[in-house]
Image (cartoon, grey):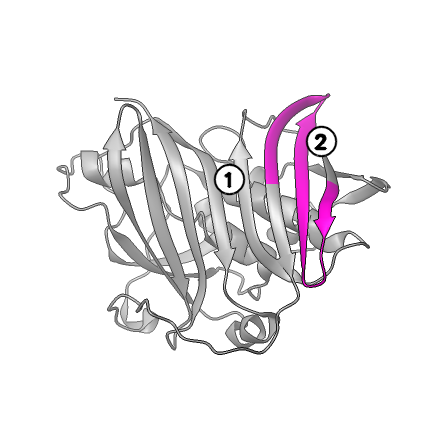
Amino acid sequence: MTEKHPFDDAIRLETIDASTMRGRTHPEWGNMVGPFGGITAAAMLHAIESHPDRIGEPLALTVNYAAPIADGDFDISLRTTRTNRTNQHWFVELSQGGDVKTTATAVFAVRRESWADTESRPPSAPPPEQVTASGPDGIVVWTLLYDMRFVEGPIPAEDDQPSPSSTTTLWVRDRAQRPVDYPALAALSDIFYPRVFLRRGGVVPSGTISLTTYFHADQHQLNGVGNDFVLCTAHANRFIRGYFDQSAQVWTRDGGLLATTHQVVYFKG
């Protein structure tokens, strides 16, 4: 542990050579198996952000969780596959002892002024100050690092009944009020517990296989968010043969769409 925020500790990387960086798992970001998927996505995005050849801001990130990450050091290797005038494509691998655990592709872009509109609308929710903060869920430690205020679909208790809806909506911010940047937004895109918990009314063994996040916010909009709450909402579209998908959105307090995210999740039962 250092005096840095646990998030910054978890995504801190040491440059090994021009294409390799080394990080280390952080105990406060532990999940049911290995680290929280959102912090892994954040570290891989941060690796690209830190690379001297990077241009622009994150536009899209897809992370494929191939195998559990063990506690300890890991290496992130990265390379550009193509750089155009306004966008840049990256391929990233996270490995331990030469064994690939996670892969990712990312697109960074130089944003330009253009016509703009948002067809989606944020879910209806009272201000976060009017919503009771939830306590720790008792399942994973990383939730202690966030102030979560559920508007709809809180994590079910052991004796809860199955729900006909998979939708969860909640206000979230870093408990230490660390400002939202792109790595933090990548982590927030995976803030939701598995949708199968809500539908089945309890904890079900499950894990994300692939997570894609589209970053709609530019740096100016993120600067405006600062350390405020963001409104996150997610739902599943279909559960079948041991897998389900999830679609989610991350909004600002004043109705600005920061990110949309989609993932596919494995589950048992």
- The location of residue 146, given as percent across then percent down, is 46, 55
What is the number of the mark on residue 37?
1
Which of the two discs, 1 and 2, sits closer to the camera?
Answer: 1
Work out whether residue 93 or residue 196 is closer to the camera in this orientation and state it: 93
Whether residues under marks 1 and 2 lie with C-beta atoms below 8 angstroms apart, the answer is no
Kindly identify the amino acid type of the residue bearing the numbered disc 1. Answer: Gly
- The location of residue 19, given as percent across then percent down, is 81, 40
Distance between the Cα atoms at labels 1 and 2?
16 Å
Which residue position is annotated with label 2?
A: 73
- The location of residue 119, given as percent across then percent down, is 33, 69
Q: Quadrant of residue 147?
A: bottom left
Kindly identify the amino acid type of the residue bearing the numbered disc 2. Answer: Asp
Work out whether residue 97 or residue 228 is closer to the camera in this orientation and state it: 97
For the point 46% across and 49% down, which residue is it? 144
- Residue 227 colored magenta? no
Asked if residue 57 can be seen in this view, the reply is: yes
Q: Residue furthest right?
A: 17
Q: Quadrant of residue 265?
A: top left
Work out whether residue 145 or residue 84 is closer to the camera in this orientation and state it: 84
For the point 42% across and 65% down, which residue is it? 230
Say which label, 1 or 2, has the lower sequence index. Answer: 1
Main structural element of the magenta stretch: helix, strand or loop?
strand
